[in-house]
Amino acid sequence: MEANSRRRRKDEIMSHHFSDPVLSKDCPAGIFEPDKKFDPKKKTLLLYLSCHGRTLMEYFKHRPDVANGWNILRFETGPMVTAIQNGIPIFQRDSTKAIFGMADALFTYNMGDRHGELALRKVRSLLKPDAKIITMVAPNCSCLSPISYGYGGGIGVQDAFDNGKTEDQIWKSLLDGTFNPLFNIRWRIEIGRLADKEAYHDVGLAGFIQRNYQRQKLFVAGSHPSYNTMAYLGNECLARIGFEKESEEKIIAQDPALGAIGNEPETDYEFKHFRFQYPMRYQGLLGGLEYFHTMITQYASNWRSGGLIHPAKD
């Protein structure tokens, strides 16, 4: 009786809730991504993540044991926040409640009340009592780029201003390879921050970065991991719900551009300074090095205000 009831509920979600206009709205990547081959007889894995979930979906598509064995659904938190800000009570919608309610496993972050309306403690009540919740550290790492946003990504630029350099001088130093991004101190900040977060997450990232950052491109931007990084996190999460783990060597050997979102241009200097051993892949994208020129200008404004205003919002 219970199995029939569960199947009827999944059939209802397939026929009605998946077509909910709020869930299918392009905002910009869509609040919800349904599995095009949804099978009510299979278990359901729900990804409750930011844009990182898109790359994770790409990894799962390359795992036949996952793609063929489970339904995989995805909520994207960014568009969900936008919907809430636009007055749409996304968590009060029957569609949202039903989709959370059908999850046998949930992969997400554990950000506490910093996640606001999207906090994990607020969605727990929507899940089945036996649903497995696996949390992963949010994959952010700005120190592998000479200049980046967030988590001390502009320390090198601000230090140069402290030492009397002008915007033009900093820009020229980036071009000729004499700019000092203060990699060592930024590395310690980033790895320490990630290691601290691992204390309250199921799956961490600091060790993986330390082992592999020189031999594979792990981040295409400060908050945008490569395919390999998301594959590592996905592999570790899957192991916690009973899947066989792939080897780290297999994960590292794959193309980092698969499903990767966003990027910052690479420079010859980065490869000299950070001693990266992998080939350059993204040079010339996002306007080439002018991308960094824009960041220097924004950090200049940030520095003049005492460094208290985030450059992207200044």
Image (cartoon, grey):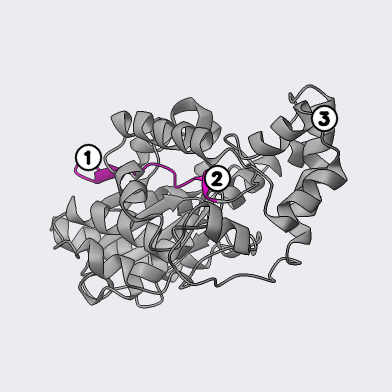
Horizontally, residue 235 falls left or right of residue 265, namely: left
Horizontally, residue 114 falls left or right of residue 125, namely: right
Quadrant position of residue 84:
top right
Q: Nearer the viewer, residue 216 or 256?
A: 216
- Spatial CA distance of label 3 from label 2 is 24 Å
Kindly identify which numbered label has been placed on residue 164. 3
Kindly identify which numbered label has been placed on residue 129. 1
- Which residue shows up at 25% across the image and 70% down it? 250
Q: Residues within 10 Å of mark 1 (few under 14, many from 20)?
A: few
Q: Nearer the viewer, residue 117 or 53?
A: 53
According to the picture, the residue beneath numbered tag 2 turns out to be 142
Disc 3 or 1, which lies upstream in sequence?
Answer: 1
Disc 1 or 2, which lies upstream in sequence?
Answer: 1
- Which residue shows up at 31% across the image and 63% down it? 10
The amino acid type found where label 3 is placed reads: Gly
Kindly identify which numbered label has been placed on residue 205. none
Q: Residues within 10 Å of mark 2 (few under 14, many from 20)?
A: many
What is the magenta range?
A: 128-144
The amino acid type found where label 1 is placed reads: Pro
Residue 248 percent across, percent down from the top left: 24, 61
- Spatial CA distance of label 1 from label 2 is 38 Å
* Front tag of 3 and 1: 3
Callout 3: SS: loop
Horizontally, residue 290 falls left or right of residue 30, namely: right
Disc 3 or 2, which lies upstream in sequence?
Answer: 2
* Front tag of 3 and 2: 3
Callout 2: SS: helix
Q: Is residue 92 above or below residue 23?
A: above
- Which residue shows up at 60% across the image and 34% down it? 152
Q: Is residue 71 above or below residue 313?
A: below
Quadrant position of residue 149:
top right
Instruction: Indicate whether residue 133 is drawn in magenta.
Output: yes
